[in-house]
Image (cartoon, helix red, strand yellow):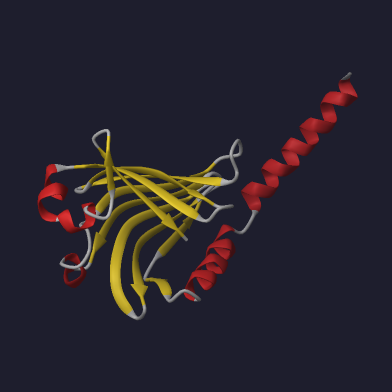
């Protein structure tokens, strides 16, 4: 009985130590190289490593060599990515939706085929998911009055049902 408990304890301890000592910055730089292939560059960021996660502070995001948006804090954890205070640069605010205060992408061990998406901001609350197998993005938007008044052209492309706007995009 004692031996059967020791083996899982040793395995758990090894995995815990491995995750804590893993170089998380290298994982971030690898991810940064992968997204650079899609003309997306994160610059001027400050990286802080923790035991089970790491934070990226004050980053600028450039798309096709144009400054697009900046964020205050992006946290990578074992289950997902969380971004706080996303704001577009002034010249992009006229073309695109206003800033989001919180944005979170999470992966679940229970359902590994989907990534959950949640967000909130001036436009309202967004919930949805990405179906990895079928390559489909599904979003539900509970729009604010500000969104309904100033950004009707975005809402026209969405289906309105049960007081929410639904958007489906095949990737």
Query: Which residue shows up at 36% across the image and 79% down it?
Result: 64
In-front residue for pair 59/64: 64
Considering every residue shown, the one lying at the far left of the view is: 149
Relative side of 59 to 1, left or right? left
Q: Position of residue 112 (x, y in %)?
A: 60, 44
Residue at image location 71% in from the left, 43% down from the top: 15
Q: Nearer the viewer, residue 143 or 36?
A: 143
Q: Quadrant of residue 72?
A: bottom left
Q: Name the spot of residue 128 as percent of width and height, x first.
A: 40, 44
User: Total number of numbered labels?
Assistant: 0
Is 166 or 42 nearer to us in this picture?
166
Q: Is residue 85 found left or right of 43 in the rendered image? A: left
Where residue 87 sits, quadrant-wise, is bottom left
- Is 92 on the left-hand or right-hand side of 169? left
List the single residue furthest toward the top. 1
Residue 47 in the image, given as x and y percentages of width and height: 45, 61
The furthest residue to the bottom: 65
Measured along the vertical axis of the image, is residue 145 above or below residue 56?
Answer: above
Given residues 67 and 13, the one toward you in this image is: 67
Q: Name the residue located 27 percent from the left edge and 55 percent from the top edge.
A: 157
5 w.r.t. 118: above or below: above
- Identify which residue is drawn at 83% across, 28% down: 6
Locate the N terminus and report the quarter of the image it occupies: top right
Q: How far from the left and from the top, in percent, is residue 31? A: 54, 65
């Amino acid at each position: 009985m004692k031996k059967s408990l020791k083996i899982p304890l040793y395995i758990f301890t090894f995995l815990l130590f491995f995750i804590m000592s893993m170089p998380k910055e290298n994982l971030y730089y690898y991810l940064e190289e992968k997204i650079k292939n899609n003309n997306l560059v994160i610059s001027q960021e400050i990286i802080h490593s923790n035991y089970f996660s790491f934070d990226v502070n004050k980053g600028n995001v450039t798309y096709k060599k144009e400054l697009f948006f900046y964020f205050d804090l992006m946290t990578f954890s074992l289950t997902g990515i969380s971004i706080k205070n996303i704001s577009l640069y002034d010249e992009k605010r006229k073309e695109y939706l206003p800033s989001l205060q919180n944005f979170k992408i999470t992966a679940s061990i229970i359902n590994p085929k989907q990534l959950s998406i949640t967000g909130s901001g001036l436009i309202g609350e967004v919930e949805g998911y990405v179906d990895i197998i079928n390559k489909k993005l599904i979003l539900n938007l509970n729009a604010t009055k500000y969104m309904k008044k100033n950004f009707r052209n975005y809402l026209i492309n969405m289906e309105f049902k049960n007081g929410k706007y639904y958007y489906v995009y095949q990737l």
